Amino acid sequence: MADEQANYPKRIGIIGAGISGLSAAWELSDSGVEVEVFEKEQMPGGLAGWFDVGDTTLEKFYHHIYNKDQPLIQLIEEVGLKDQLVFKSTETGCFYVNRIYRLSSPVDLLRYKPLSFPDRIRLGLLAVRARFIKDWRTLDNISAKEWIIKHSSESVYRVLWEPLFRSKFGRYASEISAAWLWSKFVQRGGSRGKTGAEELGYFKGGYGKLFKELQHQLERRNVKIHLNLPVNEIIMKDDQAIGLLSPQGTHRFDAVLAATQLPDFLSVTPALPVSFKQELETISFLGNTCLVLKLKHRLSDTYWVNITDVTCPFVGVIEQTNLLDESHYSGYHMAYISRYMDVGDPLYSKDIEALFETYLPYLQKIFPEFSREWIIDMYLWREPHAQAVVSVGYSQKIPPARTPVKNLYLTTMAQVFPEDRQMSNGVKLARAAARQMLQDIR
Ligand SMILES: Cc1cc2nc3c(=O)[nH]c(=O)nc-3n(C[C@H](O)[C@H](O)[C@H](O)COP(=O)(O)OP(=O)(O)OC[C@H]3O[C@@H](n4cnc5c(N)ncnc54)[C@H](O)[C@@H]3O)c2cc1C
């Protein structure tokens, strides 16, 4: 009887068909285990989900990659779509008072007039200093604010960084760990081409195309993907996970992997040990809204414009068609207007028309030629858990992949630290969690 059980294929249930859930399924497929994925939405993709623009797809929230995003690049290669990846030199800018300053390369930094010349040098030295730091853990004990002021100056923080931190982390701006900033310097510094300009990557046809192909190939490898089927609860018995409860009933598994955002995991695990639950609940999140404009004309030739004007209701304008040109979008120009905020902020729940009217005067200030006649279409996307608040000491809070509940595993964006929450980090963590599960259940 014991032998029979040992020979019986083990079954793993995965919650979530975002990049993490599907990467874990990819890792587990062809390994002799039976895998089922449960996704509450009608399509896979999660935060990298898409909508159709003409005959192509575009992410609801901007998604570029870096040449250092090897785990994702490798996955794309394994799926056989590497020829769809394109890398391009892109321009980054900063809107300050009344104009956009280029901030794409170290030379642009030297020309950044809002800072005094000595401050520009201090800022450059800060970036160099960051690249020489090998152990980021020492930086996790200090806030980015303190670190910037200590190694450059008060005005470098106030003029450049404070508005950027405020725009991304709102009221938590001064609490963000210096380790997170360090990884931004290292990651973005490492994605520069020969000219010093940043090179960003994108997937031709949009990540929708990648997700559709992943789903198709996973199904051919006998992975069952249930779309439109939420998991209501992870079933636990005697302190171990034994299955999932969905509107279709009970699904028995030998192990369960939650590949969701942390608050979604908490909402399906009422029986989690109290102390573990309390630890996870100390991690806060910010929401994001992206208003996407489909336009007759280009706003500017900059891919990413950071807005340092604190009165502006949005924080960044990301013009997708400066990454992948307009010929891919039936000749139209696509731009994201992005804003991070607490989900309780009244702006978060504004409808699309009201939000656009709020944004319009600022759009006209930043892009003086822009007018509402340019607009062909508008789309509004909201996500309540867009960014974990990575405050000082965050490394102590990183949730483990193997939870205290036997056979229950977790792979989630809040585990990504000090790096930024790129999809590629999701792929890396999810595949590692899947390998860990295989090892454990065998
Ligand atoms: C504004 C914004 C900009 C970004 N920009 C970039 C970028 O430029 N480059 C980049 O690489 N990354 C970017 N990211 C990050 C990237 O989107 C995420 O890292 C990645 O998509 C996370 O994938 P995931 O699978 O871990 O989680 P998710 O994508 O959140 O997937 C989790 C899935 O679980 C499902 N789910 C939740 N609860 C249940 C349940 N009870 N039952 C069944 N299913 C459930 C959800 O519907 C979802 O599909 C950005 C994110 C945001 C928000």
Image: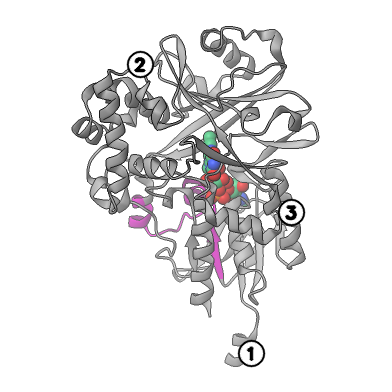
Local packing at callout 1 (Cα closer than 10 Å; few below 14, some 14-19, many 20+) is few
**Alpha carbon of mark 1 to alpha carbon of mark 2: how far?**
74 Å
- Indicate whether 273 appears above or below 168: below
Residue 73 is inside the magenta segment: no
How many marks on residues? Answer: 3
**Disc 3, disc 2: CB below 8 Å?**
no
Looking at the image, residue 238 sits to the left or right of residue 31; the answer is left
Question: What residue does disc 3 label?
Answer: 213
Of the image marks 3 and 2, the number of the one nearer the N terminus:
2
- In the image, 86 versus 413, the foreground residue is 86
Q: Position of residue 295 (x, y in %)?
A: 70, 18
Q: From the image, state whether disc 1 or disc 3 is nearer to you.
A: 3
- In the image, 397 versus 197, the foreground residue is 197
The answer as to whether callout 1 falls within 8 Å of ligand 1 is: no
Looking at the image, residue 374 sits to the left or right of residue 178; the answer is right
Q: Position of residue 393 (x, y in %)?
A: 27, 47
* Quarter occupied by the N terminus: bottom right
Residue sitting at x 42%, y 52%: 415
Local packing at callout 2 (Cα closer than 10 Å; few below 14, some 14-19, many 20+) is few
**Alpha carbon of mark 3 to alpha carbon of mark 2: how far?**
47 Å
The magenta segment is 255-279
Mark 3 residue type: Glu
- Residue 52: image quadrant is top right
Question: What residue does disc 1 label?
Answer: 4
- Indicate whether 249 appears above or below 312: below
Local packing at callout 3 (Cα closer than 10 Å; few below 14, some 14-19, many 20+) is some
- In the image, 181 versus 260, the foreground residue is 181
Residue sitting at x 35%, y 42%: 180
Q: Which mark is residue 113?
A: 2
Mark 2 residue type: Lys
